[in-house]
Structures are given as structure tokens and as C-alpha cells.
Amino acid sequence: MKLLITRPLPEPVMAAAKAQFDVTARENTLPLSRDEMIAALSDYDLVLPTLGDLFSADIFAAVPNPRAKMLGNFGVGFNHIDVAAASAAGIVVTNTPGAVTDATADIALMLMLMAARRASEGERLVRDQAWQGWHPIQMLGQPVTGRHVGIVGMGRIGKAIAKRCHFGFGMQVSFFNRSPVADPGVPGQQVSSLSELAGQVDFLVTAVPGGAETRHIINAEVLAAMKSTGILVNIARGDVVEEGALIAALQTGQIAAAGLDVYEREPIVPEALRALENAVLLPHLGTAVLEVRSAMGMIAVENLVAFAAGKEPPNRV
């Protein structure tokens, strides 16, 4: 079967795919264009896409009788694929859950620490040769240990963040989840209102999937409910946060700081956000660990192999 891999992947993943399929490996690191997506559905039996490859309903409509029968997505998030439209076209969609949990949770803690202790601002000071030496009131930040964290979304990643916060930093944990959580993994309180949670905590951390149901779940109302000393961390999807409202909240001091790994229109990051000293900005590093990316790729290949063998893929969405 002919397989298109839309971005360069770790070598062990490429070797595993080539052992099973007739592979075309695209070398471009940018997302597929519209024409490339149409060609992918028309010319290949299987496609291994990833974040940014926007397989919308419009793309599926442009290929009424697609040759492709499966999109084996590289990544947990799949909001760049219209799954309903894919299904209507007879195309199976899978993802790669599990492998990303620890690496993404680690990034959340890093952003919490960096934002609270003004690490990005401090590094810029040193790199710009503007640091004049230590003094007692220089760059005073906030503690993390013993503070109150609120987690938005208590799935695998949310629970992993909670464990790090509670057991590693002695933090009080509260969380908001759309359904009841029987076992959060730590002593924690589920709060029924997101605005209520935002008003209680020192750190508000998003860990929800992307998509229409969570778009702008962190909006002006939620940001207004946060403490003036509050810190927002987003390691979920960029459109979970209403970016314009966040910029305004940071500019006016409505909240103290934000740590972001994802953006509403990435890779575009607004100049107004880049100009803010109280924003820690990372280039979507959540799963950027060789072992993690390799494991993600192997899961994607396993899904493809199962489908090609006439079996149910392990991670169908």
C-alpha cells in the first residue's frame, strides 16, 4: 500500500514505515497546502499527517472518491482533521495518545516555574548585557511551592500535571472537567464553574483537547475572574485561549503573567504578545523529546499496519 508521510519523522519511525509500506516521505517541514492535501487523498492509500495539515470538510468535498482510506495522525490532538467529514468519505482517523503525557506535563511545570520566577525576562537581561549584578529587590517573582493550582481538563495530561504539582511542589489542586472525575490521582477538588476555579487559584493550567467545544474556553470572563497575581499556562491548543483577551489582561496587569506553548494562529504570534515581558513564549515544545516523538511515530505506524491488515486500529478516533 502507498503511504504518504507529510513531515520528516525520527529515523526509527521512517524505517518501521518503510518495512511495511511503499513510502513517500515529504521533506518539507511546513504543513500541506490545499493542493497537496487533495493529492494526498487522491494518490495514496494511507496518509500519516500531523498538526497543521488542515484536512477540513472542504478538502474531503474536493475528492468525492478518495483513494486514501486512513489518516494515521501523528499527535494526540486531531482538531486539524474534520473527523465527521472523513468518516462520511469512508476514511478512518487515528491518533497517538499515551506517549505524550509525561513530556507535556513536564512542559506545563516548566512554564509555571518560568512565569512565576521571571526566567525568560532574566535570561534576556543577561543576554542583552544589561544585568548589573545581584541585589535584594531585583526581579522579585512568585513562589510555586505550596501554592494553589487549577487544572482545566483532568484527562491523562491533567492528572500528570496534578501529580507533579502536588507531590513535587506541595501544591493544593483544584480542577474543572466537563464530566465527573472519580479518581484525580491526588487530593483535589473538582469545581463546577471555570470562572469559580479561576478566582480561587494562583496558577490556571489548561490541559483540554482542541476543537469547537473548547475554543476560547479561557476568555475575557475567565481572565477577569483570576487574581491579579494569577498566572495562566496553556499547553493544550492555541485556540483554547482567546488570545486578544489574554494580551489585554497581560498589558493592563489584570493577571500577573502567562506561559504559552501554543498559539491561536501558530506559527503566527502577535507582536503585542511578543512585546510583553510577562509572557513566557515557547515554540510548541510540549512533546519535543526524541524518545517521545519516536514513540508517537511508532504508534501511528502501528495504527496504519493494523488497518492495512484488516484489523481495528488501536487508536481510532
Image (cartoon, grey):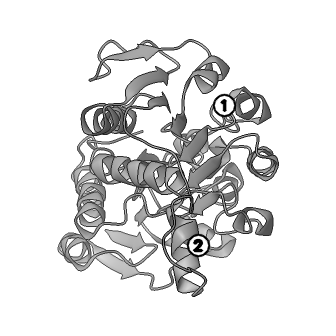
Q: Is residue 283 visible?
A: no
Q: Residue at x 41, y 55 (%)?
A: 110
Task: Give the image location of residue 97, x and y in percent.
Answer: 33, 45
Residue 297 placement: quadrant: bottom left
Q: Nearer the viewer, mark 1 or mark 2?
A: 1
Q: Looking at the image, which residue sits at the far front?
A: 136
Residue 125 placement: quadrant: bottom right
**Vertical comparison of 182 with 89: above or below:** above
Tell me the quarter of the image containing the N terminus. bottom left
Task: Give the image location of residue 103, x and y in percent.
Answer: 32, 54
Q: Residue at x 57, y 56 (%)?
A: 262
User: Residue under circle 2?
Assistant: 32
Q: Going by the image, does 116 lie left or right of 265?
A: left
Q: Which mark is residue 227?
A: 1
Task: Give the image location of residue 35, x and y in percent.
Answer: 66, 74
If you read the primary sequence from the N terminus, does the residue marked by circle 1 or circle 2 appear first?
2
Nearer to us in this view, 167 or 281 = 167
Amino acid type at circle 1 is Lys
Q: Residues within 10 Å of mark 1 (few under 14, many from 20)?
A: some
**Vertical comparison of 261 with 150: above or below:** below
Which secondary structure, mark 1? loop
Which secondary structure, mark 2? loop
Nearer to us in this view, 52 or 129 = 129
